[in-house]
Image: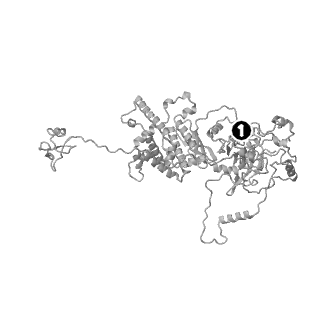
Amino acid sequence: METVTITTLESLELVEPIEKPLHKKTRRDFKTSTPTPDGYQSLWSSLDEIIIEEEKAPAEEAPPSPSVYVECSTMVAAANKSGHSTTPHSKAAKKRPANTVSAKTTKRRLILSVAGPSSSHAPSEEEISVLVNFGSDDEMSDDDGGEDMAQQTVFVPRATRIFMPDENETPEVLPLADVNDSVDRPPSAEIGPINKFDFRWTGFSSSNVPEVRREPFSDINCGPTLKLASPYKAFTAIWDRKIMEHIVVETNRYAQQVVADMLYDGSLAPRSRITSWRDTDADELYVFFAIILASGIMVKSRIETYWSVDQGILSSPGFAAAMSYSRFQLLSKCLHFSDNNNCNPDEMTRNEARLFKIQPIIAHLNNKFSGLYKLSQNIALDESLTQWKGWLDIKQYIPNKAATVGIKTYEICESKTGYLWRFEVHAEHELPPHDSPLSGTVPALVLKLLKGLEHKGHTVWMDNFYNSPALARELKVRGFDCVGTLRLNRQFVPNELANLTKRDLTVGELRGCTSGDVDLVVWRDKNLVALISTYHGMAAVKCGTVVKPSVVADYNVCMGGVDRKDQMLAMYPIERQRSRIWYKKFFKRLLNASVLNAFILLRSQQTVTHRKFRDSLVKDLIAAHKPPSPSAAPTTALHIPAQYGFLPGSQHDRTRRLCVVCKKRTNAYCKACNVALCVFTCFEPHHTRK
């Protein structure tokens, strides 16, 4: 039995891609009013004629494939004598068969038969019973299996059934060790793995049906878990009163600590801005968040320009009307999320100590993001980067990201919408004990991010930083499908693929193998491209005029969930303002991502654009939480004597009027009463009488 299948794209059958892109590629046709003269047809019309001629030409039938279905010894023997397979022939280009159960098929196999495709020996019933079919299950006919299928209520993943005992096992069946001694098996026949990480790599068979091998998934309840009516409701569903009150308490506490430290070291000046601090509340923080979000919509180079009094074309009077510049700077300085008195590095791990300042926000958002939305089938796992160029021991360098250097997060996003479902901040992985192939930091991280999604049929799309055969099988056991690129130096990759170089393959050539539930494919394009999948097999897809392996086409469609999220956030860069505190800048990034999630929650229920959502959110936050401007309190005028002005043309004589008390002429009067009064004799009696 061959270990690795060697083929080319031209020899593979063309199938329809499983995953469909959000927007189909369209071609713009310019139709002229005048007919085109003969001999001057456009390039597109020439191509269309060529395509039509090719479609009219009869398609050549594919060569007969070896037998992959074993129904009975008589049919197998007849097929071996005739030299043809019992399976029907297929044309070069056909659609994948529907996910239906055949009435005549009794066993579906993902590996070749015992004696091989070219052997004339028909396998006996004992030889067939001892073979382990990776990822397969019993498909019963409509006559004898209808009642059993109707009573089945618990769906067990296919990969899990590999290690489960057969419920219909009879006492006559011998244990695996006795069968090895009693049954006369051909030399090529092998017993299936008794260990989860015992990979038996074989070549691909022609019976691969991805729709059957893929884990079942129901998208009935996908989407938001709450009904939301407005951008404000969607935002406050994430940033509720509980977390806002927590930030209020910690911000007020930190402000008092700042004042105490400044008094202790003598740096508190009488005119310091912190001397005007007053405790904040949740309503003021909502307005503070609204101003931060507005700065991402209206981008300016410096923060103080938002409060400029210039009445020019670039003026923004709404910022000053919502909050003063001095108060905004005070809140930015004192914004805090954890009590510094609870920070004890001796009792914390390195990760906990590094993320102590921002940990309450991370925990809250992870809880809210995963609770407010149910993911669809395809989810992407990738890393994102928040730019930070200052000194920080946890910052990472990723050259293919837009930020290049900064704070790295591992994120689970929905492939279709980019919804951020869960994230973990990179703060130096904790090293678990090395006692199994999954004891590394990367597999532990993947399983931690996917916690809570087990046995639901999700397909996880990852790049070669995460993928490995051991992780793919573990995910398959837990009810996931796994697809992505692969590094050929991973553990359990067969040597026939691990030792391949670019010179060993020609352009368009493929090599691959399968262990039943895990498929490995190496494709030579401009460079070697290695991929791993749990259901794709080896098939080709025509993307426009280019033919690609089906796993490559689906990977290009579904892998961009995290990148789609970063692209939508880049249009509103609220975290671009300079800051000396890394966790405050990272908080703005999380605030920005939460607004995007709120937009996705609302968009699935009503039609709204991203820009309109943010505009409405800023206005609603200010309208709902900005305190009304205090009315002008009546001022109590002070009764102070004053003198009238000089007469016109004179510098010594003042205006004189009759005193309201003694009726004598005087040049003095009361400012509050605005009546003439003698200063020494009548001023006090006039204000003390009733």
Name the residue at 48% across, 46% down.
293
What residue appears at the point 12 percent right and 42 percent down from the top-left corner? 662
The image quarter containing residue 412 is top right
Q: Residue 130: where, in percent of width, then height?
A: 81, 40
Circle 1 SS class: loop
Q: Which residue is at the front of the view, 212 or 380? A: 212
Locate the N terminus by quadrant. Answer: top right
Q: Position of residue 655 (x, y in %)?
A: 15, 47
The residue beneath circle 1 is: 491
The residue furthest top is 346
Crowding near pointer 1: few (<14 within 10 Å), some, many (20+)?
Answer: few
Q: Is residue 400 visible?
A: no
Residue 534's spot in the image, x, y percent?
A: 71, 45
Instruction: Name the image quarter holding residue 148.
Output: top right
Q: Position of residue 249 (x, y in %)?
A: 46, 35
Q: Nearer the viewer, residue 551 or 407?
A: 551
Whether residue 565 is visible to the viewer of this picture, yes or no, is yes
Drawn side of residue 673 relative to residue 533, left or right? left
Check disc 1 and give the amino acid type: Gln
Looking at the figure, which quarter contains the C terminus? top left
Horizontal side of 350 relative to 256 (left or right) equals right
Q: Decide which of 394, 284 is in the foreground and name it.
A: 284
The residue shown at (86%, 44%) is: 124
Task: Using residue 605 as the reference point, say whether residue 622 is left or right of it.
Answer: left
Total labels: the figure holds 1
Out of 129 and 189, give the one closest to the viewer: 129
